[in-house]
Image (cartoon, coloured by chain):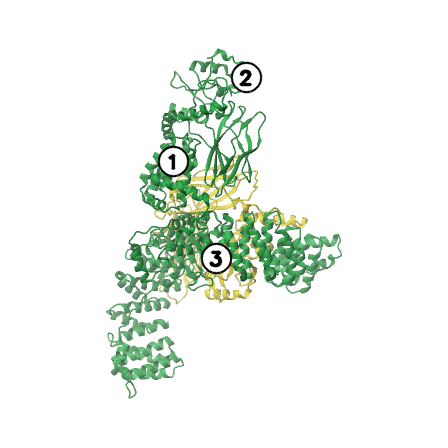
Chain colours: A green, B yellow
Amino acid sequence: MSSNSFAYSEQSGGGEATELGQEATSTISPSGAFGLFSSDLKKNEDLKQMLESSKDSAKLDAMKRIVGMMAKGKNASELFPAVVKNVASKNIEIKKLVYVYLVRHAEEQQDLALLSISTFQRALKDPNQLIRASALRVLSSIRVPIIVPIMMLAIKEAAADLSPYVRKNAAHAIQKLYSLDPEQKEMLIEVIEKLLKDKSTLVAGSVVMAFEEVCPDRIDLIHKNYRKLCNLLVDVEEWGQVVIIHMLTRYARTQFVSPWTEDEGLENNEKNFYESDDEEKEKTDKRKKPYVMDPDHRLLIRNTKPLLQSRNAAVVMAVAQLFWHISPKSEAGIISKSLVRLLRSNREVQYIVLQNIATMSIQRKGMFEPYLKSFYVRSTDPTMIKTLKLEILTNLANEANISTLLREFQTYVKSQDKQFAAATIQAIGRCATNISEVTDTCLNGLVCLLSNRDEIVVAESVVVIKKLLQMQPAQHGEIIKHMAKLLDSITVPVARASILWLIGENCERVPKIAPDVLRKMAKSFTSEDDLVKLQILNLGAKLYLTNSRQTKLLTQYILNLGKYDQNYDIRDRTRFIRQLIVPNERSGALSKYAKKIFLAQKPAPLLESPFKDRDHFQLGTLSHTLNTKATGYLELSNWPEVAPDPSVRNVEVIELAKEWTPAGKTKKETPSKKFYSESEEEGSSSDSNSDSESESGSKSGEQSEEGNSSDDSSEDSSSESGSGSESEVENQRTAKKNSKNKRKSDSEDGEKEHEKSKTSESSNAESSSVEESSSDSETESESDSASESRKVTKEKEKTRQDRNPVPKDVSLLDLDDFNLVSTPVALPMPALRPSLIADLEGLNLSASSAVINVSTPVFVPMKTHVMLHRMSGKGLAAHYYFPRQPCIFGDKMVSVQVTLNNTTDRKIENIHIGEKKLPTGMQMHVFNPIESLEPEGSITVSMGIDFCDSTQTASFQLCTKDDCFNVSIQPPVGELLLPVAMSEKDFKKEQGMLTGMNETSTIIIAAPQNFTPPVILQKIVNVANVGVVPSGQDNIHRYEELKFQAL
Amino acid sequence: MIHSLFLINSSGDIFLEKHWKSVVSRSVCDYFFEAQERATEAENVPPVIPTPHHYLLSVYRHKIFFVAVIQTEVPPLFVIEFLHRVVDTFQDYFGVCSEPVIKDNVVVVYEVLEEMLDNGFPLATESNILKELIKPPTILRTVVNTITGSTNVGDQLPTGQLSVVPWRRTGVKYTNNEAYFDVIEEIDAIIDKSGSTITAEIQGVIDACVKLTGMPDLTLSFMNPRLLDDVSFHPCVRFKRWESERILSFIPPDGNFRLLSYHVSAQNLVAIPVYVKHSISFRDSSSLGRFEITVGPKQTMGKAIEGVTVTSQMPKGVLNMSLTPSQGTHTFDPVTKMLSWDVGKINPQKLPSLKGTMSLQAGASKPDENPTINLQFKIQQLAISGLKVNRLDMYGEKYKPFKGIKYMTKAGKFQVRT
């Protein structure tokens, strides 16, 4: 220690030796530093010197020590001036540590803290967004009131920053400024309003947090952003999700009418839980017309549902409470599964979740009944978890499961954890009162427990039995006698008091025992607990009234003892009883009624769940957990009777409105289901021919997803309840239709596509249909080949029809820029690429048939390749495929169709091809720039690339208005080929000429079921654009085309 | 939201404090200590403690209490989940999360905490991003840092936070590209005295270790996805794809992460791979009790059961036990009354057993309940639910990764009542 300080003090002298010494200390690192600086102020001097040194390592070391002090809770504010000087340090770690220090101590040293402000102000203008963000973060964390205007300015600027990350930090800064100076509220609300409009997922969570903190009552700010928030929710980071969901729950309760229908309410006996009675009545009148859920209400429920699958327990709980508070009761059931899943988590999570389940299980038993066994107690659970589980089990008990439960309870009663055993006995008591069938069984069981060796168990049993007996018309003299005997042994005051009370109440049924008990009690009166003393007094009074001959003296003796008791309660009670029961000259009319007063029928106590009264708190909140209103708790309002104007949520952006109108029209014409699946299909594989059609389709898809028109949502729900098979048929039809007017995907893809739409359709429907579809998929994967071949034949048939529009297309364009082609039927020379022509020249082309006829390519489902993934393309996705059509841009080119998708929520403008990096000789015909692409929209463009008969990659840039993405297209060999029609003879001849270098042969082993001509054919044409040569022999198929071999 | 964080060790010392808003005096922890005293056992300390001006939310892990101080209404799970995330991050950074380790790395801890919360609201909780911001300490780096004076604070600014895939850091490069997936299933069960199953459930997780270059896009499909009753995903998994096709499609984080946790529906009968035969008897008259347990395999699908450990909390009346195991070692702690028997592998030909006598407190009455037996075991290469991964494909990158899938079944909370 001393050597360290020695090294430091010498340090100012400089030189090699000191530096070495310093290095040695830095390896000792902060842990050693704790002891070092704990007391001695002199050490602070050393630190100051280190901070002022010119070496970064010394500064860093000093800062590390200071952080160590802060962590320990030591006051390091004395070093403030020395530290603050380093705020502009070049070393990033020093800088960060200085920030940490500054944020912690600036409050105490306000004037000095101002020295650092200019550094941050400068950083706020930095071109790097991350530096801007961190500057704002630190600046706003310095709690110095003088800089409020500077902060305000910085926040305003940052809120308009281009970077969403900076805007996120601005949202955080709002809360900090608000807590520093609440006067700024109005200005801050303006910023919040602006940020709420932000479409970035990064910002959403933080700004809603700021909203909740600053102006939770300004619900009007949410209207316009409601739909956007719902739609963004899934992509927001998990912490933001929690905040947004809680906010939206409150919002929904003010804006929508109650979805809880009468029947459900009655079923649960809790219908007017949130409403007062007359409100309910009014509602009944209103309910004459059927309830239709607001589509926005539905939107919220639908968009939060996937979040039940979150790994974050807080998110799951947030969704669960949302469903509980705002969804129709029939739909809330899905949350139970997810909540039960959380029970596997850590003890603390379990504790909170169980508490919430306990509250829920009181109101809607049915929700958790299937999971009864998940709440069985393990001996290793902590006591608090055990009691909560027990509470839930008790709530869930009904006639059907009570016998199983009681058996389970028997095990718990024997638990070594006596506190838990006692709780179990209470639980049994509650079951006994709630379920009349088992009352006697429970009572007998409890009586058996009276002979338990453990006193706590016995005492608890006594208390519970007392309550049970009180509810029953007394025919249990035996039990009372038994309990009277227990008085000799039992010492727990509550139990003794209970027994005494019971005997007093039933003193006329046990006339022999009661006076004797009183006699015993009179003897031990002075040593009893206060609770017991009170009951002795009561017992005495009751006996005095019923059996004064035997007990008059005893009672008076007890009353005398009570008169001088230390406890004033007992003295009071004594005085009161004496006046009442002992007749004297001054006693009034009351003593006549003494018997009635003491021995009146008393209402039986209700054994209720301790969670009964928690339900007025929103679930999942701190207030619910504590069962008291926490600071800042926001009450969940009752459902409004009449929904406020839903149009406030309409966003008046023109483009969106435009989108909706045509979709709305089509909607009325076509049934929604068909529509839905069609849009699904088309969204993924759209065609240039049916461009306009697919666009409207995808729009409608989007629209139905957003659920903006009310008829849409009702149709939606009808499709949900619709049977799975129906939707399947529907799907098949659309699928067929699709394949008819489209050149479609390779068969596997198609299958999948189909499958996808099918499952997505039926996912909301009954589970049976889900099962069906998934079983489908299994069989499909097994008999893949079979279905494939079937598909092929079908597809072939269609190919013929398909041809019609396509050649027309080509010929139309022919007129403009396809002049090279002399005859549309035969394309002799152009069909071959130059290199190949050279080849063929050497091979004496004339010897074979004079012309090479390009045959129509065999139709195969096309295979799309990813050009630009949406993740890397900032939302712009691009896929390409080879349509196997003669290219219209040039005979040497291979035509490529590129489908562009916009997966973002804003328009992408000016999509064009930028810089090309093509290998020599390669050429490319680019598509015309696309002005703009709507959100969720897609467009297909064609381009031509001359690959020079090689598989070289064509790289180029795909540019939008803001960004450029490097993409590339690499053709599979098969796509470079062109099928040619020729006779078998010609084929053999050509083949003969191509032997040697140009020949490749392989042996393919195929499974027998795959060895049928159509299958092989299909497989081959899938890979390469070739045609079939008619063959004499059955087993030999020739997939020719010269190039195929030539390559 | 979260005002301050205090770390408290088992002896009740506050060894670290961090404040995100104004400083809250550490005396607020007195309320916590009070509750701790009342609770007797650490795990019975209530996770939420109200005090006059603050609320204390705590988690207890690795013998450390992480106590968060909050002032206003906030979903308690939000804070608790966050605290657990903090512990996970520490574990990820330092390998273990213990008092000495945290004290040694106090600077890194402070830097990490500073990044995790801003004004009490979580900012960066993905370990991939944090590691880009602040590099975890390694021995090599510590040495290098002291010599060169360089730092463990990342000098390039984190871009991951800004991307659409915030869980993955950018510019990942590996020479060996590999992706390993461990399917681990745990059986939670309560077995009754007579050997019949009272309740049994399977909880599974898929833990992944993915070291792939660039931005790979993976899909993982199952042979029998219908088995999965309830699932929860890492945020990287595309939910829509799962809904429609039951395929896990995701861009993985770099390194270790939990891809999925699932629950196998309770409707499916759960195969219980082991049975326990027991005869534990106390007699009223004598001060000796008899104790005998045998463990044997039941439905193991032909796989060996390994790593078997039997633990049991004996009643307080038991003073000592003299037992002889047929294999493995056993210990009995006369203070905590905890019996543990490390069995090892079960040989089906010669079943392991533990026999002997217990000496009871003289004069005390016999305990009413026989002790519960807790079982731990492992079965390699078996997922007891029958879940099977069908295939794993990678898109978006050109290289061929090395892929591996491992199955394992473990006992979760496996209790046998006697």
Separation of marks 1 and 2 at Cα, in angstroms: 46 Å
Check the image and report above or below for A1027 versus A618. Answer: above
Q: Secondary structure at mark 2?
A: helix
Separation of marks 3 and 1 at Cα, in angstroms: 44 Å
What amino acid type is highlighted by mark number 3? Answer: Glu
**In the figure, is residue A159 to the left or right of B196?**
right
Q: Which residue is mark 3?
A: A212
Q: Callout 2: 10 Å neighbours few (<14), some, many (20+)?
A: few
Q: Secondary structure at mark 1?
A: helix
Q: Which residue is mark 1?
A: A754
What amino acid type is highlighted by mark number 2? Answer: Ala
Separation of marks 3 and 2 at Cα, in angstroms: 76 Å
Check the image and report above or below for A850 versus B413. Answer: above
What x and y, as percent, mark residue A637?
40, 59
Return the chain for callout 3. A
Q: Quadrant of residue A622?
A: bottom left
Q: Quadrant of residue A716?
A: top left
What x and y, as percent, mark residue A845?
50, 13
Where the N terminus of chain A falls, by quadrant?
bottom right
Task: Point out the tag, 3 or 1, that comes first from the N-terminus.
Answer: 3
